[in-house]
Image (tube, rainbow, N blue to C red):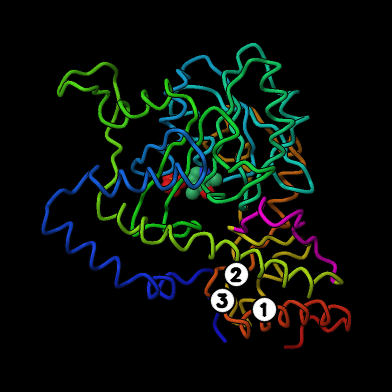
Amino acid sequence: MKIPPINLKAQFKGVRKDILKGVREILDEQKLILGQYCQELEGQVASMTGAAHAISCANGTDALILSLMALGIGQGDEVVTTPYTFFSTASSIALVGARPVFADIGDRDMNIDPGQVEKAITPKTKAIIVVHLFGRICDMKRILAIAEKHGVPVIEDMAQALGARRGGSSAGTFGDIAATSFYPTKNLGGIGEGGMVLTRRPDLGEKVRKLRVHGMGEKPYIHEMIGFNSRLDEIKALALCVKLKKLVSWNKTRLETAGYYNMHLRDLPLVLPAIDDETSHIFHHYVVRTVRRDALQLHLKEKGIMTGIYYPLPLHLQPCFSYLGYKEGDLPIAEEAARTSLAIPVFPELKKKEKDYIIKSIRSFFEKQDEGSEDDQ
Ligand SMILES: *Cc1c(COP(=O)(O)O)cnc(C)c1O
């Protein structure tokens, strides 16, 4: 059996007809950028999450940069964030001229540890970026209490968590502003690059709308601020509108698969992702941890199962951030997670027999260890 980490071809089969029909209409009309489908997508994401303002843009990294710029963050400012995330959570901070300050993660949820956030705050801290990693919402109650105490705004990087809810609120509506991505492999993945900013604050929403189009307001060619070009194409927005109708059911299937894996792997020497309730984790990735991570990955590869490592090097140890002065051992939980994490396929199109094969293959790795015959294959 061959199992890819994600199967976009299988996903496309279910939406192909509607997307191709819409693409034809758009091409006949030739309204190609920021038109009715972008508006429809913004409206649908706003109503689904409860965000007051939703502004589409070119990609998730731009959504983070737009959020930071809207908050006026730049040279001389510090932004506290997690070292255990995709690169652009922190690169966006550096790209607006500010300094990323890393706070270690919690061992249980792999999300930024509120206690460490509080320790990292200085008089220069101008924002906190939390990441709902792998689809699990952070401990927002504690994060928001700390942010309020210090008068610092919160940005949510929700690129892996669109549709997750905790305590009745959706990812993207806890903080001041939120950034998401529609990169093809995300839970809501487009047919190319795409992103969106969500915010409850009208002042920030208005600023982001201008910043994404060269800082122009109502009057064409009058630039109120120095913005950039970060618009979404109509064809991509249309495809996202079609796929958005399936997101709730896709997320539910991911959660069910995660529960199925947990049930059948719980006796093994693996750290499994905790499932606290039915909504606060949408399993963008299903990540297990073991000190024998590399051997397990190789074993699964030999069985035809492709896994992923998110992420092999925490951001505070990336070559490009050496100027920040971090060294190995500074953020031990993130470093350990980078050494032990392995993402097992959890995409919604997985068939039952594929899930059972994955379980059987993981079990055979540990059974092989027990017999002490690691090398004969
Ligand atoms: C994917 C991702 C991004 C960046 O989104 P792009 O659309 O690829 O620019 C940012 N943060 C996290 C946590 C992501 O997973």
Neighbor class of circle 2 (other Cα within 10 Å; few <14, some 14-19, many 20+) is: many
Circle 1/circle 2 CB separation < 8 Å: yes
Distance of label 2 from label 3 (alpha carbons): 8 Å
Q: Position of residue 288 (x, y in %)?
A: 72, 62
Write down the region rendered in magenta. 268-283
Which residue is label 2 attached to?
A: 345
Tell me whether the residue at label 2 lies in contact with that at label 3, contact meaning CB atoms closer than 8 angstroms.
Answer: yes
Q: Is residue 217 above or below residue 373?
A: above
Q: Nearer the viewer, residue 89 or 222?
A: 222
Residue, disc 3: 350
For residue 223, side relative to residue 93 (left or right): left
Give the residue displayed 61% in from the left and 52% down from the top. 135
On residue 358, which mark appears? 1
How far is mark 1 from mark 2, CA to CA? 8 Å
Image-quadrant location for residue 354: bottom right
Q: Position of residue 210 (x, y in %)?
A: 30, 26
Q: Is residue 285 magenta?
A: no
Rendered view: 227 above or below 298: above
Splitting the image into 4 quarters, where does residue 85 fall?
top right
- Residue 363, located in which quarter of the rendered image? bottom right
Query: Where's the C terminus, which quadrant?
Result: bottom right
Q: Main secondary structure of the magenta part?
A: loop
